[in-house]
Amino acid sequence: MDNVPTRLSAALRGTLVALCVLTRLAFVGTPAQAAYGGLRLPFPPGRAYVITQTPGAYQNCAATGGSHCIGNDIWAYDFGLHIGDQIVAAHSGTVIRYVAGFGIGSCDPAFRNDANYIVLDHGDGYSSIYWHISYNSASVAPGQFVAQGHPIADAGAAGIVCGNPGDHLHFAVEPTPLGGQSATQSVQIRFDEAGEPALGTAPVSANRARYSATYVGGSEWVVLGNGEHHATTGLWRNTGWDSWSQTNSRLGTFGPEPPQDHPSILTGTNRVGQSQATVAPGQVASYPFELIGPPTPGIYRVYLRPVIDGITWMEDQGVFWLVDRR
Amino acid sequence: MKRFAPLAALLAGVIGMAALGATALAVTRGPSGPAAAYASQSLGYSVQLPAAWRRSTALSALVNNGSLKVGHEVFTVRSTADEAGVLNDPGPGAAWSYVAVVEQWRDPLAWTPMAWATDPLLAGWAQGQVVENATIDGHVAAKVTNGPRFSVAYYVYDAGRMFVVGYKIDRPDWKPSAATESDLRAIVASFHITP
């Protein structure tokens, strides 16, 4: 099931949207409101999971009697993750509630207080809540701040789950619960890459990768004489969920000129280091280096691409510095 | 005389708060009104239930799945019919609000109450929770206020077992009309480990 996006035709999707709107008007009757945004789907990029229950507003609740039809969960989504599938942060936030000590749950309401869940406070008055995570699978610590896309835990079947084993991810956004509250009333939400996905669809996550970079600036056209030095700096923004460390964050050479990871005639090296000790998600890394005028006149390029030593090359955005050796 | 009423009220409040403070960490009092004893054969404890409170058969359960948790019993003031009406609410649910709970866990390594209560995997964790040393039923205990699973919970160890005795108040709008926090406190305070 994982990694297999389900694509609906535009016509079918349109029909479903129309049905959803009609259903909402017919059975809930609440006025449209601005949905809480800035969310990405709560699983790793490229993965797709079936929506197994939409908010009650988009169900024929009189017929389905769905668990999202009443109470706190009327704007919650259930995703068809299975035990062990990775859940990631739909929004950056701080872990403010953490329960991960229970095993498989059941449909019996007697086990409602034995649910594993994690709550992330977004810092804007709202929090996201991830229910039914597997025993001892949390990838975050109490009080930890995590970036969007950071792994939260593995999916599971703790707490009130119906079915065998009933594993899934129950996800909602709520006003941040006060001390002593385990949950509050969910609010309408939309995902950046999927809007308000319909029942049975399997939207593909475009959440953040662990390592991702976006070029910010620094590319130059430089005129140099033979052996002349020119100090410059490349700037890339950390758009992944993990921090970059000075110990392994580099700016590497990339083809076609010179070949990937080969020393450039313009720099004398294949990789240069990040100047900051740590660059957190959202921050901009600086890679200072020198360009050196080659002996032979001509136009030279050095293509550059950020890399985490020993782990991965980040996005190639075709960035190059150009030297006019006169 | 009238102008001193606010001062008198303030003094009464201070005295009341002091009394509450004095009993908060050394829980020795049971219900003040008519109460009925409930003794749990399966979990090995007893509590005093104020009038109208009862053990919920719908919410009480033994676990029997090999985990550390042995089981729990829940005490509610809701009638069986009232409880049934909210039993299948999703999320934490109204049935689980304004209830007292006694859990028993296996503690083969004889963790202390404080070690258990402050372990995020065993007890969970919530920002702003307050953990204090306490006494309940004459035993050393750890008290957690505003924790992730209970509004107030005491952790108390006895003979390879860890008891968690507490109550939950999730949302004021889920309050049964007959429920009071003082009743919940009284049930918890009456907790007694039986041989």
Image (cartoon, coloured by chain):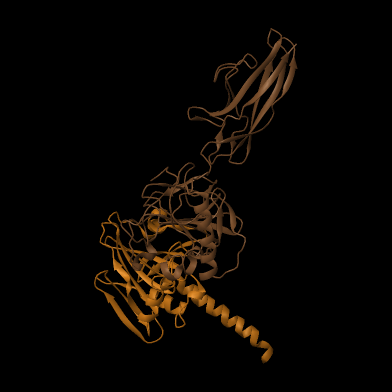
Q: Find residue A225 and report its image quarter.
A: top right
Return the residue found at the far front: A11
Query: How far across and how far down the image is residue B11, in percent?
Result: 59, 81
Position above or below: B117 against A256: below
Q: How many marks?
A: 0
Chain identity for the colour orange used in the image: B
For chain A, what colour was chosen? Answer: brown
Residue at the far bottom: name it: B1
Q: Name the one closer to the observer, A78 or B152.
A: A78
Query: Residue at the spot x=57%, y=59% of the render?
Result: A126
Residue A95 in percent (x, y) is at 51, 53
Question: Is B54 left, or right, of A23 in this rendering?
Answer: left
Q: Quadrant of the C terminus of chain B?
A: bottom left
Q: Who's the residue at 50% across and 63% down the image?
A: A58
Residue A120 coordinates in the image, percent (x, y):
52, 54
Is residue B180 positioned above or below A230 on the image? below
**Residue at screen point 26% across, 58% down:** B65
Give percent across and percent down for residue A230: 72, 19
- Given residues A23 and A203, the one toward you in this image is A23
Where is A295 relative to A72, above or below? above
**In this orientation, which residue lies closer to the viewer: A61 or A166?**
A61
For residue B80, what is the image quadrant?
A: bottom left
Q: Is residue B97 visible?
A: yes
Q: Is residue A202 left or right of residue B1?
A: left
Quadrant of image for the N terminus of chain B = bottom right
Choose top left, top right, bottom left or bottom right for residue A251.
top right
* A19 horizontally vs A155: left or right: right
Whether residue B129 sits left or right of residue B2 in the image: it is left
